[in-house]
Image (tube, rainbow, N blue to C red):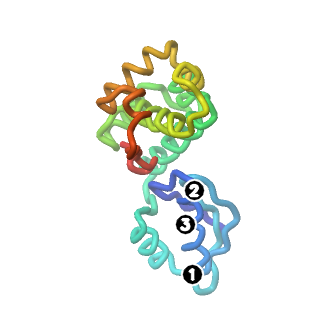
Amino acid sequence: MQETIYIKNMVCNRCIASVLDIFNAEDYVVESVELGKVIATKGAKSSFKNLSKMLTQIGFEVIANKTDTLIEQLKVAIIHKIENGETAHIFQALAKEFGKTETALSKLFSKSEGVTLEKYTINLKIEKVKEYIQLGQLNFSEIAYSLNYKTSSHLARQFKTVTGMSMSDYKNLENWDRKTLDQIV
């Protein structure tokens, strides 16, 4: 019987590969896998308990309740929107996508994660800025434009507030300090 299993902290392609390896090792037949979600069928030797234990050992967690599932889906949706440059009116789009008001999503997220939805989104965007800076393919104005900031000075202020340094200072660092997406809260 096919089942959908939601997994916390599964937010990048490396995560997908790691999770897929564990599902295969536990004799699950994986139908599809995407960020935060696996659709699979148990094999004859499958053990959900072992699967959960193995996932926990490498920093993931099987999500068992609806609220946590919604929060994880919300995180994945935000990551997708940032990756695809769809950050204009992001909270309105999320509210429509999840069939809830912006206020309801924000309250639910804050209660669950201990940080506002806006702050979480800003932190993700700042990590994306760091990635763009490291790639060196866009100037600061182009980075601001790609993430739908009204001005590059707004991005610069936000970057400094979050990181404690200017984008130029960050660009000149020898050891870039970046968080993986699953570490952002």
SS at mark 1?
loop
Query: Residue 144's spot in the image, x, y percent?
Result: 53, 22
Comes first in the chain, label 1 or label 3: 3
Comes first in the chain, label 2 or label 3: 3
Q: Residue at position x 44%, y 33% from top?
A: 171
Q: Do the residues labelled 1 and 2 touch (CB within 8 Å)?
A: no
Which residue type does callout 1 highlight? Ser
Query: Which residue is identified by label 1?
Result: 46
Query: Which residue is identified by label 2?
Result: 37
- Crowd class of label 2 (few under 14; some 14 to 19; many from 20; radius 10 Å): many
Q: Residue at position x 32%, y 36% from top?
A: 115
Q: In this view, does 96 lie above or below 43?
A: above
Query: Which residue is identified by label 3?
Result: 19
> Which tag is nearer the camera, tag 1 or tag 3?
3
Which residue type does callout 3 highlight? Val
In which quadrant of the rendered view does residue 97 lie?
Answer: top right
